[in-house]
Image (tube, helix red, strand yellow):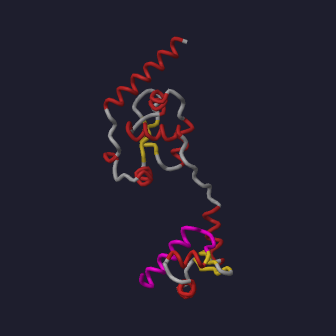
Amino acid sequence: MKMKEMEGALEAVLFTMGQAISLSSLARAVEQDEETARKILHQMKDQYEREERGIRLLELEDSFQLCTKKEYYENLIRVAKEPQKQELSEAALETLSIIAYKQPITKAEIQKIRGVSSDHAVNRLLDYGLICETGRLNAPGRPILFATTEEFLRRFGVGNLEELPRLDEAKIKEFEQEVQEEVQLTLDI
C-alpha cells in the first residue's frame, strides 16, 4: 500500500469511527507496525495544520481521533441547533407511496385509499421536503394537490418517477379484494 493510500485508509477509519482509535488498531488497518502508523498519523496531523483545514487530528496517549478545530465550533453549532429529521413512520411511508404513484393527489383521495386521516403524515412529508403543493383541483372547495419533490427522488435514489418499481397487477387486485373485505366487515358490525 502506497503512502497516500495508507493516509486515505487511516482517515477513512478515523472519520467513520468518530471516536479515539488505538494506535494498534490503526496500524492493523493499514497492515503496518505501530511506529510506521504513528509516523503517517503525525504527517497527517501536520498536513491538516498546514492546510488550515476544519478538522484536526488529535493524539490522546496511544490513540488518535479526528475532531473539529475549535475555531469552527460556532459554525458547527449553527447547524447542530437545527431540528434533526426523524425517520418516516409507517403512516408517512404509506402516504408517501400513495402520493408517488398517484400524483397529483388530494388529501381526501389519500384518505380514501388509506382508510384513515393522513393530515399528520402529509404535514410531516411537507416539513421534510419530500412532497409539495402543486396547485388546486378544479372541484368544490378547490382542494390542494400534492406531488413528490426532487428531494424525494434524491433520498430514494431514483432519477425520475418512471424508475419507481412497477406494481404487480395481481398484487393490486389482491389489495383491492382485501380492502373490499375490510369495508364489508366494518359495514356488518
Query: In this view, which residue lies farthest toward the top?
Result: 188
Which of the 4 quarters of the picture holds residue 176?
top left
Q: Main secondary structure of the magenta part?
A: helix
* Badge count: 0
Give above or below for 91 relative to 160. Answer: above
Q: Is residue 14 magenta?
A: yes
Please state which of residues 41 and 78 is positioned toward the viewer in this rendering.
Answer: 41
Residue drawn at the location 41% of the way across and 33% of the way down: 137
Query: In this view, which residue lies farthest toward the right?
Result: 61
Give above or below for 24 relative to 140. Answer: below
Give above or below for 164 relative to 116. Answer: below
Please state which of residues 13 and 33 is positioned toward the viewer in this rendering.
Answer: 33
* Placement of the N terminus among the 4 image quadrants: bottom left
Residue drawn at the location 57% of the way across and 52% of the way down: 85
Residue 11's spot in the image, x, y percent? 52, 76
Residue 3's spot in the image, x, y percent? 45, 85
Which of the 4 quarters of the picture holds residue 71?
bottom right
* Placement of the C terminus among the 4 image quadrants: top right
Q: Is residue 70 magenta?
A: no
Please state which of residues 61 and 173 is positioned toward the viewer in this rendering.
Answer: 61
Range covered by the magenta-colored residues = 1-21
Residue drawn at the location 54% of the way across and 83% of the way down: 33
Horizontal side, residue 38 vs residue 95: left or right: right
Residue 121's spot in the image, x, y percent? 54, 39
